[in-house]
Amino acid sequence: MFTPAARLRHTFSELETAMAALADLISQAAATAPVNACCFPLPEVASGDEHEPVTHIEVSRLDGAAAIAATLDGYRQWYIRPGCSAKASFRLPGYLVLPSALKPPLAEVTDAINRLKTEFKARVQETEGRDQKFALVHDTLPGLITLQVYRQLVLLPHPVSRLGFTWANKQIIQKIDKDKLVKQLTDARLSPPPLTDAQTWIQCVDREIYDVKRLPPGVELRLRRPVKTHPMVNVRWREDITPRQQQVKAHLPLLLCQDEPPAVTALGNYPPATTRKRRAARITDEPLIPRLYIYPYRPEKSEP
């Protein structure tokens, strides 16, 4: 009977084999015809600097053969790099445009890779307890960063007319139902976090429940959670598809299979020289429940 470590190692070995097949497919395509490829390498985050505020990111650029090599290396960038933070995940925005005739075999191998990535994650999640999961992964595959293994490769399903790379530096804002929040807090009363005194935790949660219940009827609640600065790409489809445009995370180079190259807006340095003006926020700056990023919100009354 296979142990969890043996099953995990076997799945990882299959994943490496599938990644090698993808590399062979792309390399063969590049050997027969020029491949439109571009990557925007980002500076590495030094160990200990992962929690520093992001004020500036210098972006470089690779094209052609150098971009293909960086892509194939980036797809398999799964381990802690010397001197780099293990908490700041590796990202390599970019794209590879391959011939449309290559789409069937490319779809087959990327589907296999993504299926193995999902299976690998499931193997890890089978183990109960955070510490046990950590031990399973790092005893079996020392130095592995699971998030970077879990990331799915993206083969865009339709021909693209434009790729617009940009930076996302915003907040997740979501409406919160008061009754559901009270139930969530009530359920959490008897589940204190590790290293937290049970009685202190109950008192804290009871205070949060009280604060929610005493809100005036006209006040709603919003989740307003900050999101780390990260690259995104706006994809505009060539065909008349609804929606015509889609936003995709640019963690790794996108794969495209089409004979006509898309127009591309390159990723620039952060912060951009110009930023879009947003509507003034109507959410107070004082959180109601800081640990959950819950804020009071008073809807503006419409003019009569």
Image (cartoon, helix red, strand yellow):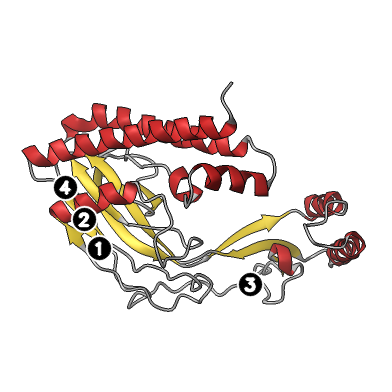
Asked whether, in this view, residue 157 is left or right of residue 146, the answer is left
Residue 60, position in %: x, y? 25, 68
Q: Give the residue at x 33% y 47%.
A: 75
Q: Earlier in the sequence, mark 4 or mark 2?
A: 2
N-term mark: 2 or 3: 2
Q: Which residue is mark 4?
A: 261
Please identify the residue farthest to the top as the structure is shown. Answer: 1
Counting from the top left corner in percent of width and height, residue 248 is at 39, 50
Question: How far apart are labels 4 and 2 at the CA level?
Answer: 12 Å
Quick check: 119 left or right of 67?
Answer: right
For marks 1 and 2 on the same chain, the one whose residue lies earlier in the sequence: 2
* Inter-mark Cα distance, 3 to 4: 42 Å
How packed is label 4: few (under 14 Cα within 10 Å), some, or many (20 or more)? some
User: 51 left or right of 90?
Assistant: right
Tag nearer the camera, 1 or 3: 1
What label sits on residue 38 in the rendered view? 2
Please tell me whether residue 155 is drawn above or below residue 194 in the rendered image: above
Q: Position of residue 151 (x, y in %)?
A: 44, 45
Residue at image point 28% right, 43% down: 255
